[in-house]
Image (spheres, rainbow, N blue to C red):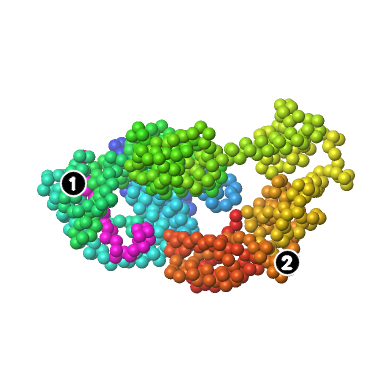
Amino acid sequence: MDPQLESRFGEVVTKVRGYHPSPDIDLFRSAFEFAADRHAGQVRKSGEPYIGHPLEVAAITADLQLDLYSLCAALLHDTVEDTDTSIEEIRERFSDQVAFLVNGLTKIAKLKFQSREEQQAENIRKLIVAMGRDIRVVLVKLADRLHNIRTLEHMSAEGQRRIARETMDIYAPLANRLGISWIKGELEDQSFRYLDPEGYYELATAIQKTRAERERYIRETAGLLRDIVQQRDVKAEISGRPKHFYSIYKKMRESQIGLEQIHDLTAFRVIVDDTSTCYEVLGLVHALWRPVVGRFKDYIAVPKANGYQSLHTTAIGPNGERVEVQIRTQEMHRVAEYGVAAHWAYKEGRSVARDDGQTFKWLRQLIESQAEIHDSREFLDTVKLDLFSDEVFVFTPQGDIKSLPQGATPLDFAYSVHSEVGNRCVHARVNGRVVNLRHTLSNGDTIEIITRSDQRPREEWLDIVKSSRARQKIRQYVRQEKKEKAKDMARGILVSELKRYGLRFEAVLKSGDLDAAAQLLKLQNADQLLIALGYGTLRKEAVIERLVPPDVRPRDEAGTSGPTASVRRIGERIKSLIGKQERRGIRLAGMDGEVMVTYARCCNPVYGEEVVGFVTRGRGITVHRTDCNRIEHLEEERRIDVEWESLARGEAESTRRRVTIRVICRDEPGKLAEMSSALTSRGVNIAQAHCRTREDGLSSNTFDLMVTSIGQLSEAMKQVKRVDGVSSVERVQG
């Protein structure tokens, strides 16, 4: 064994002995030697032996003062993923607990995913399910991510940005939700360093220049606080700490101010013995310095969802500068630093599902949502929404506290009570006053929900709610309602079609023939068949072919039947039902006359692009671009050749279509005007523009353009690409 690794192992053991009454060091050493053996010959991108990584993860896990099973899992967390070790072998050698933790930490690698985003979502899903059973899984995962981002300098620039982005989006908010402030702060600072290197080093340099001055300020201010508590014989520990770079950076961006205008770069902590003394010290601080109105927070009376408790106040201190003071007990401070890891109950593997407090309510909701949300992107969006949201605390009429995302509405509150209360909600009383569903709730509001039995959720409610639970329940209801409508439509179609052959729909359904037809069509059951037929993803002819014998079905006038005849019949039926409609420049191959034409939203074709048509039930012909990724999922027999008609001079306006492009550029004054000028110089009309400043210092600009042809769009995109500071221009699909 490398002497340096052996020495580091000894340091971790010493750390464990400092908080664990009787650690099983033999088990810990066995896990270390096993991991070292399995990772033998493997090196990290830095060139160092790979075993150094799991050892450092174990050291961070020890900083969280977790049990020996967690430390063993930290040492073994990559053995299953990166060596030929199996979970069964881990279980036999180190116990069921260690095996469960290692399995929860092992990425899903053996399945094929359509994208990196889908793989990321499924790995996060697996992690959340595992942490729902044992919170230690995510604590070890955070230790793993912390060491990885500490050593990110050896990755490629693309890898650095990808990992930093994922850390900022998922793991830092997760650490915050779990109340582990020091891990959250370091994850954010390290991510900031790679997402915006220029901004990071500029801020670090500016702060370093004032370091001596700030250290003097901390000593003097802490001394004043110490004097006032000693005068009252209050026993207290007082310290000042600089705020994390990223929190300072966020404040600068949100307030649009420079570093020199931020006067509270330091937060002071006063740690006392009991809760009553916290309030006594608060009074002393307010007697010494004038408090800033609206900056007092009582997290002792109303703890944060992660269990954090403290009194926060901001006052005008020495030299007229703002002083932020946090007052808490020793136990509150331990929870503030270690979060859920501070509770021994969770070190013993207590299940989140059995915890009846507020601490893990958000996690239980995430676990519920992962079971109901099957789309990977939607699930990842739900996770980010839940993790990022700041909180607002409101009350039920009975005085119970509910925590909701900042900006929440009465609908969010209603769905937090029960899904049926949300579904039937018509308005609310907030502090005794009737308000509409769009009303924004504030801290301390008391809410009473008014329901009506005939009320139903509507899709536009998704624009009102802020909580993932409300969004999930509304989507669930709307989807189910659409399915029921599709089934009703399909029943109507089949009742009419079967009647032509002397068959009754109810009899076919009862006999099981519809289920049998579904099986032949690779669908689960009759319900799924009806839904597919109602949505238009399944041809009625395909169903009839499997329900009615061939000798009973009529042949078409050319003496043929099947898909070709089906398309022809559908086309003729469209023409007879719709009559002549505005084609907007499309010619249909093989069809005389004109039929209704719509343009697919998924690819949004523009005049001049290569296109193909698909017969769509109830909507005539839908036109797609030939490179649209939806085409492969559409039935070949519905395909029909289409082409753009030649237009006479002056007819171009009839083909004007709305297209969206995204432009990434430097975030500088006047840049929007330059880009707009470049676009309009090519005759393009800007219908809408949306600009967003990103955390990496760039600006993401989305333009909705009205263009007459693909040529005009291409010219406009080339012109805006020439604007100084523009790094990319792309067309947005869908």
Crowding at dot 1, Cα within 10 Å, few <14 / some 14-19 / many 20+, comes out as few
* Amino acid type assigned to the residue bearing label 2 in the image: Leu
Determine the residue positioned at 72% across, 32% down. Answer: 514
The quadrant of the rendering that contains the C terminus is bottom right
Percent coordinates x, y for residue 443 in the rendering: 34, 44
Give the vertical position of 593 relative to 329 (above or below).
Answer: below
Q: How many marks?
A: 2
Percent coordinates x, y for residue 403 in the rendering: 38, 41
Crowding at dot 2, Cα within 10 Å, few <14 / some 14-19 / many 20+, comes out as few
SS assignment at label 1: helix
Residues shaded magenta: 249-274
User: Visible in this render: residue 177?
Assistant: no
Report if residue 268 lies within the magenta region: yes
Percent coordinates x, y for residue 291 in the rendering: 22, 52
Question: Are circles 1 and 2 on residues that touch, CB within 8 Å?
Answer: no
Q: Nearer the viewer, mark 1 or mark 2?
A: 2
Residue for badge 1:
283
Q: Is residue 250 left or right of residue 557?
A: left
Report if residue 698 lies within the magenta region: no
Residue for badge 2:
647
Outermost residue toward the front? 434
Give the vertical position of 266 relative to 131 (above or below).
Answer: below
Q: Is residue 592 left or right of residue 204?
A: right
